[in-house]
Amino acid sequence: MLTFAVETSCDETALAIFSKEKGPLAEILLSQAKLHSPFGGVVPELSAREHTRNLLPLLDKLLKDSPVKLEEVDFISFTLTPGLILSLVVGVSFAKTLAYVYDKPLVPVHHLEGHIYSVFLEADPQYPFVALIVSGGHTDLYLVEDFGKYKFLGGTLDDAVGESFDKVAKMLGLPYPGGPVIDRLAKEGEPKYKLPKPMIEDGLNFSFSGLKTAVMHLIQKERNYKVEDVCASFQRTAVDILIEKAMRALEITKVNRLAVVGGVSANSELRERLKGLSQERGFELYIPSPKLSTDNALMIAYAGIERFKRGKVAPLDINPSPNEPLEEFGRRWS
Ligand code: KG4
Ligand code: ZN
């Protein structure tokens, strides 16, 4: 089974051709990070315009490297929701046009579902498992009972954890995206500042805006701080919060498998500490390799294949929405 996949929900234009039997056959990804960097975050309209500019040249390049032609794929997978609506509109229109021209079925994928299934590109987790999704737009815990059966356990009430990495980086005059930069600088600093962990005792929801504000007060008060120390202190606190909540989710659900996915799962401190804990406490841990943690089209292809196998295809008048809840999407499309 062969699929062509399109991902344009945020600031990566990503295309892939993926075979169920052989794995990835061709992949291409263009990050717009440099374009958005001066603004400290993604500018939605610029993102959409870049996707429009780049999709066809990228397709051309992908097909030159691909052992199969577009005519040979069985269907087209694409990210339908959630994301920046203008960016989604560009990718969805592109997928629909190709489906029409090549007479291929269209298979929608939820972006968070894509992140969850990124772990299946490298491992074979059994159901059920808890998924901690940590990205620029989301910080959510789900119980994954099967493909399409996602139970929401908790999520952020304000900023996403990736967003807080990006905002703290901006305060420190560091480039966008802030996560990888803070990760690197934290290695050279001491986590010497004590920062608040909002809602830490409180169930499975998260709150990161207070932590971000505390970092702002810290750098206003401490004139002679070392950027590396602030990075190490912020990262230590953010990772403490994520780990505390993930461990609580395993306890509450009585499940001993944890998948940690999304851009922030590339964080080296989060990965190392979780690895240690999984050995100590005896739970199975699944984290995609850093390349598959951030947005990519292979994860959309994998989830698309799971959906197509179940006979679910979209009509030609399908339209994206900026934020359809994963639980509802799973029920509707499985
Ligand atoms: O999943 P993703 O590529 O896009 C969204 O769906 O949002 O996640 C992007 C987020 C950004 O906020 C970025 O700063 C963060 O992931 N990120 C990291 C690291 N690499 C990327 N955060 C912490 N440590 C990293 N190494
Ligand atoms: Zn993402």
Image (tube, grey):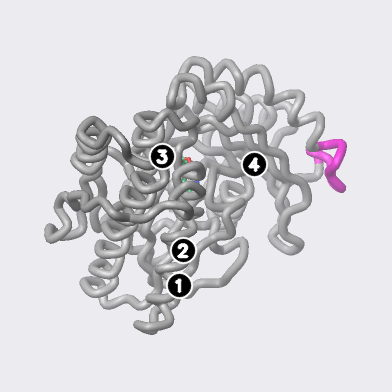
Q: Which marked residue is nearer to the observer: mark 2 or mark 4?
A: 2
Q: Position of residue 35 (x, y in %)?
A: 57, 21
Q: Which residue is mark 2?
A: 271
Q: Is residue 110 visible?
A: no
User: Which amino acid type is marked by label 2?
Assistant: Arg
Q: Residue at x 58, y 69 (%)?
A: 123
Asked if the stretch drawn in magenta spans residue 69, the answer is: yes
Determine the CA span between mark 2 and mark 4.
28 Å
Q: Which marked residue is nearer to the observer: mark 3 or mark 1?
A: 1
User: Which amino acid type is marked by label 1?
Assistant: Lys
Question: Nearer the N terminus, badge 2 or badge 4?
Answer: 4
Residue 5, labelled with which disc?
4
**Dot 1 crowding, Cα within 10 Å, few <14, some 14–19, many 20+:** some
> Looking at the rendering, which quadrant does residue 201 occupy?
bottom left
Q: Which marked residue is nearer to the observer: mark 3 or mark 4?
A: 3
* Magenta stretch in the rendered image: 63-71
Regarding mark 1 in the picture, which secondary structure is present there? Answer: helix
Instruction: Classify mark 3 as within 8 Å of ligand 1 or not, answering yes or no.
Output: yes
Determine the CA span between mark 2 and mark 1.
6 Å
Asked if the stretch drawn in magenta spans residue 239, the answer is: no
Regarding mark 2 in the picture, which secondary structure is present there? Answer: helix
**Dot 3 crowding, Cα within 10 Å, few <14, some 14–19, many 20+:** many
User: Which amino acid type is marked by label 3?
Assistant: Gly
> Looking at the rendering, which quadrant does residue 225 occupy?
top left
